[in-house]
Image (cartoon, rainbow, N blue to C red):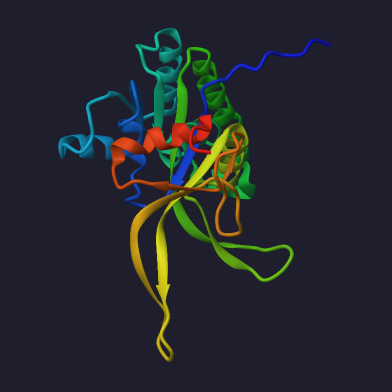
Amino acid sequence: MAKPKAVFQPPRIVLNAVEGWGKTSTVAHAPDAGIIMCDAETGYSTLLGAGRVPAIATAHATTWQELLGIVAGLKADPGGIEVLGIDALSGAERLCYQCVCDRDFKSDWTSFYAYAKGPDLAVNEWMMMLAGLDALRQHGIAIMILSHAQVRPYANPTGTDFDRYTTDTNRKTWSATTKWADAVLFGEFYTVVEEKKGKRPKGTGGTERILHTERRDAYDAKNRYGMPEVIDIENDPSKTWGTIWNAIKGDNK
């Protein structure tokens, strides 16, 4: 058996972060970026109209087939794009579910969700989209899928249940996507809790952004690059992609 040569491939990143963290701005300020807005996701257009992000290549997918077609079109002609953002995971999932529901359940959502049959079938479709994104990496395109974080109860099999940050998508979609990704990054604001005797603890601060790169009980995260456990993010959206890229390449270790 021959030893393979070490070749760096463009990363597959999932950025799951709380509202207002700057997910869309991260992609918009990446070099030679493009973004696909899915379903009702129009955050980039709003930011562009407000003059808060630069103009980049955009596409808007309103059906699952449109999304697959856009990805296939980029494979045929990348158009100079080096970083592709998908905004957002939940929007793409809605398109996928609508396609499967219309095709296999005659547009009956009750049947779609009965015994989780629809989401199970949808995972197969979802993997097709991820395979299409993998093909783009052969053209040197890095992928960043944006995800909206939310708090959900967690059934702890080894002890007391607790709340944790997760995503606003089905767990099967999330599982397939995080297994595919090279890095799952969780973004939040640094919180300081002020405690006074006899009073309910009060959160203060909340303006400093951070990224977590390793899983903890409170959130999902991972990386295959040996990134620092926590990355401080400057309050300047134009520098966020560079900070993440430097961490992936090991420039800040």
Do we see residue 42 in this rendering?
A: no
227 left or right, relative to 84: right
Query: In which quarter of the view is residue 217 placed?
Result: bottom right
- Residue 191, image x and y in percent? 41, 64
Q: In the image, residue 236 lies at what x, y percent?
A: 28, 43
Task: Choose between 173 and 238: the one closer to the eye.
Answer: 238
Observer-nearest residue: 107 or 37?
A: 37
Residue at (53% x, 33% y) in the render: 250
Residue at 59% x, 67% y is 162
Q: Quick one: 226 or 49, which is closer to the camera?
A: 226
Give the side of residue 82 with respect to residue 12, left or right: left
As drawn, 115 above or below 31: below
Give the quarter of the image for residue 150: bottom left
Image vertical order of residue 38 relative to residue 213, above or below: above
Q: What residue sits 34% from the left and 46% below the top?
A: 234
Residue 134 percent across, percent down from the top left: 55, 21
Q: Locate the N terminus and report the quarter of the image it occupies.
A: top right
Quarter of the rendering containing residue 81? top left
- Can you say whether 186 is above or below 122 in the image? below
Left of 166 or right of it: where is 121?
right
